[in-house]
C-alpha cells in the first residue's frame, strides 16, 4: 500500500517534469517580484536573478534524473 502511494509522488515522464518545473518557475517569479518590492535597487534584482537561477538548476537536475532513470531501466542487467 505504501508503495502505491509513493508512486503518486514519483516523476515518471518528461511531461510531468515540465509541469513541475513550470510550477516552480511560477512560484519563483512571484517570490522574485516580492523581493523587488522589499529590496529596491540592485539587491532586489540580485535576489530576483537568484530565484530564476534556482529554477534553471533544479529543472536541469530533474530532467537529467528522468533521463538517467530511463537509461538505467533500459540497460539489461548481466
Image (cartoon, grey):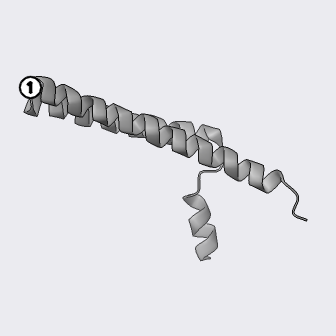
Residue at screen point 30% across, 36% down: 51
Q: Is residue 42 left or right of 29 when viewed as pictured?
A: left
Q: Is residue 16 above or below residue 56?
A: below
Return the x and y of residue 38 as percentages of the image width and height.
Answer: 9, 33
Q: Residues within 10 Å of mark 1 (few under 14, many from 20)?
A: few
Q: Residue furthest right?
A: 78
User: Residue 56: where, in percent of width, then height?
Assistant: 44, 34
Kindly identify the residue that appears in the image at 24 percent across and 37 percent down: 31
Query: Where in the figure is residue 32, as x and y percent of width and height?
Result: 24, 32
- Measuring from the top left, give residue 2's x and y in whole percent: 58, 75
The furthest residue to the top: 41
- Whether residue 35 is visible here, answered yes or no, is yes
Quadrant in the rendering for residue 67: top right
Q: Quarter of the image containing the N terminus? A: bottom right
Picture layout, residue 34 above or below residue 68: above
Is residue 16 in view? no
Q: Secondary structure at mark 1?
A: loop
Q: Is residue 63 left or right of residue 36?
A: right
- Judging by the rendered image, the residue that carries numbered circle 1 is 40
**Relative vertical location of residue 43 with respect to residue 74 in this rendering, above or below:** above
Residue closest to the eye, 14 or 76: 76
Q: Quadrant of residue 14?
A: top right
Q: Residue at x 91, y 65 (%)?
A: 78
> 7 left or right of 43?
right
Residue positioned 35% across, 32% down in the render: 52
Q: Number of numbered discs present?
A: 1
Amino acid at each position: 500500500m505504501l508503495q502505491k502511494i509513493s508512486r503518486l509522488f514519483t516523476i515518471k515522464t518528461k511531461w510531468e517534469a515540465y509541469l513541475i518545473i513550470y510550477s516552480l518557475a511560477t512560484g519563483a517569479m512571484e517570490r522574485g517580484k516580492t523581493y523587488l518590492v522589499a529590496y529596491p535597487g540592485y539587491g532586489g534584482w540580485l535576489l530576483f536573478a537568484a530565484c530564476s537561477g534556482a529554477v534553471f538548476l533544479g529543472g536541469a537536475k530533474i530532467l537529467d534524473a528522468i533521463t538517467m532513470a530511463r537509461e538505467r531501466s533500459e540497460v539489461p542487467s548481466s
